[in-house]
Image: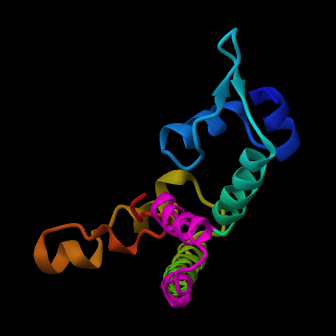
Amino acid sequence: MKIGELARRTGCAVETIRFYEREELLPEPARSQANYRLYAEAHAQRLRFIRHCRALDMTLDEIRTLLDYHDHPRQPCDAVNGLIDDHLAHVEARLSQLQALREALVNLRSRCRGKADSGHCGILQELSQPLPAEESTGLVDSSHVPGPHRGG
C-alpha cells in the first residue's frame, strides 16, 4: 500500500508517518519502480503501536525502548514494567503541577470581578508583581510551568 492508504488505514497524517520513518521508529518501506513507498501490513501494525504509545504521552525514546522489547520478545519484560512505572510517576508529577497551576489561576481570577477598568484590574496588578523566586534570589524560576518538558 502507498503512504496515503497507510495514513487512511491508521488515521495518521502522511507527514507524521514520514517523521516516524526519519526517527527510525518505522522501518523504511520498499519502493516501487516509480519510487513510491510501498508499505506492508506490518507497517500499519507498528504505526498503530506507536500511535497508541503517543496517545499515552510517551516520548520517542520510551517508544523506541518499547519497540525494542516488542521486536525482541525473548527479553524479560521487567524493564517494560519499569518504563511504565517511570512514565506513571512522570504523569503523577504533571498532575500535581497542573493542580498547582489550576489553584494559581483560580486565585488569580478571584482578584478581579470585571467591574473596574483595566487600569485597576486585580489580575493585571497581580501579574505585575515579582514571582516569589525573584524576590528571594533575583532569578525567575520557571519550574512551576507544567507541561510536556521531557526530552524525546
Q: Is residue 9 left or right of residue 91?
A: right
What secondary structure is the magenta-colored segment mainly? helix
Q: Residue furthest front?
A: 74
Q: Is residue 56 above or below residue 95?
A: above
* Residue at image location 54% in from the left, 82% down from the top: 80
Left or right: residue 26 versus residue 44 is left
- Displayed quadrant of residue 110: bottom right
The residue depicted at 77 percent of the width and 40 percent of the height is 40
Q: Does residue 64 appear left or right of residue 32 in this picture?
A: left
Residue 139 x %, y %: 16, 68
Q: Nearer the viewer, residue 125 or 109?
A: 109
Residue 152: x, y in percent? 43, 57
Please give the range of residues in magenta: 57-86
Q: Which residue is painted at 78% across and 26% down in the image?
A: 2
Residue 134 rendering spot, x and y as whole percentages: 20, 72
Answer whether residue 101 is magenta in the image. Answer: no
Q: Relative to 81, does residue 148 appear above or below in the rendering?
A: above
Taking depth in this image into account, of 61 and 71 the one nearest to the observer is 71
Q: Quadrant of residue 84?
A: bottom right
Q: Is residue 122 above or below residue 20?
A: below
Residue 122 visible in the picture: no
Give the x, y percent position of residue 123. Answer: 51, 65
The quarter of the picture where residue 29 lies is top right
